Amino acid sequence: MHQSATDPPLRVLHVTQPVDGGVARVVAQLVRAQCDSGARVTVACPDGALTAVLREAGARVRAWDATRSPGPALAGEVRALGRLIGDVRPELVHAHSAKAGLAGRLAVRGRIATVFQPHAWSFEAVGGTTAALALKWERFGARWAHRTVCVSEAERERGVRAGITARWSVVPNGVDPRVFHPAAADTVRAALLPDVGPAAPLVVCVGRLCPQKGQDVLLDAWRTVVRRVPDARLVLVGDGPDREQLASSAPESVLFTGDVADPAPWYRAADLVVLPSRWEGMALAPLEAMACARPVVLTDVDGARESLPPGLAPRCLVPPGDPAALAETLVDLLRDPPLRESLGHQGHRHVLAAHDVRHTSAAVWDLYRELLGGVRTAARVAPTEYRESIHS
């Protein structure tokens, strides 16, 4: 994944909102790889913890003050992004998630090579009239993306079934095995949870505390789990708008960590990692957990089956929104340490083979080269006319 020595540095602008959770980690991974390749990478995003990570990776960061969801400020956010794009003059814009995908495509309108990556569809996150409007936009806005990148085949198929006519690519999410790797659980757990004995079964859920991630369903299931495995403990790693509500209904066996800079130690401390999402494209947390050789339990939403090793679905998947099924699976695995160990090893081997972030980054880079091949040639022949045309 390197540019030719004879080519000028590729100018890429990533636009992202949100700036936390799995989307932020995906953006940081891509930016780091692209900077290492010699590209000139800029990221437009709201200020926050992500900006320091991006600068450390070698990117230029431009403040884009945008809310997480569409609202009255949208028109001003689009204008501000348009001015920023005029200053940066990228050859390619890569917009991540629904909000940045909305503002980015409105600001560019196909005049620059545009990649849109939904990271789960916006119309699944809402209901009623709002969902209908979100779907109408995705159908219309697809014309302004030269490529729509889905993180799973299931996510792409969901878009097709919804009537979105796009130029599709599927690039599965990946994780960095140098960051997420196995380690002894006892040592890590003693440092993180000194008051929890090493024999207590530990379940960990990493994700933003919000309706999408389904921690409310997990807490419903957990009441059954602790009746049948009384010494079990559950840790919810992350923060979000539902924290207060979740904490008010959680039993004493549940710990809330808040935001953490690095979730890897929590995966390593776990006997079992669970993600009870209501919808996804392909969740990053299960891949990170498997890279740490930890078994996972997931809801059967988009991307879940594709993220698991072949044959593991019956052991690791439960229907979304079903606390009884989730509790039964958690109890079965908590009572079977040899099976957990086997599932963890299978998951680790699978992630190394199929979800190494280096494969993901290389696939995205190849997509950029495909989209820009003819354009870059034209730009070298007539750079002034080309640059004026795409910013007019």
Image (cartoon, helix red, strand yellow):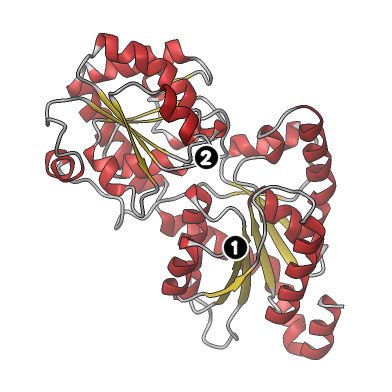
Q: Distance between the residues labelled 1 and 2?
A: 24 Å
Dividing the picture into quadrants, the one containing residue 284 is top left
Residue beneath label 1, please? 46
Residue ID at (76%, 49%)? 71
Tag on residue 109? none
Q: In this view, does 285 lie to the left or right of 134?
A: left
How busy is the neighbourhood of tag 2: few (under 14 within 10 Å), some, or many (20 plus)?
many
Is residue 350 in view from this perspective?
no
| Numbered disc 1: secondary structure | loop
**Percent x, y of residue 258:** 38, 44
Q: Position of residue 86 (x, y in %)?
A: 75, 78
Snapshot quadrant of residue 120: top right
Q: Is residue 296 visible?
A: yes
Q: Residue at x 79, y 50 (%)?
A: 142
Above/below status of 342 relative to 106: above
Circle 2 sits on which residue? 282
Judged left or right of residue 115, residue 216 is left
For the C terminus, give its image quadrant: bottom right
Three-letter code for the amino acid on which mark 1 is drawn: Pro
Q: Earlier in the sequence, mark 1 or mark 2?
A: 1
Q: Is residue 257 above or below residue 29?
A: above
> For the point 17% across and 40% down, which residue is it?
189
What secondary structure is marked by label 2?
Answer: loop
* Label 1 neighbour load within 10 Å: few <14, some 14-19, many 20+: many
Residue type at mark 2? Met
Q: Which of 309 and 177 is in front in this view?
A: 177
The one nearer the camera, 77 or 41, is 77
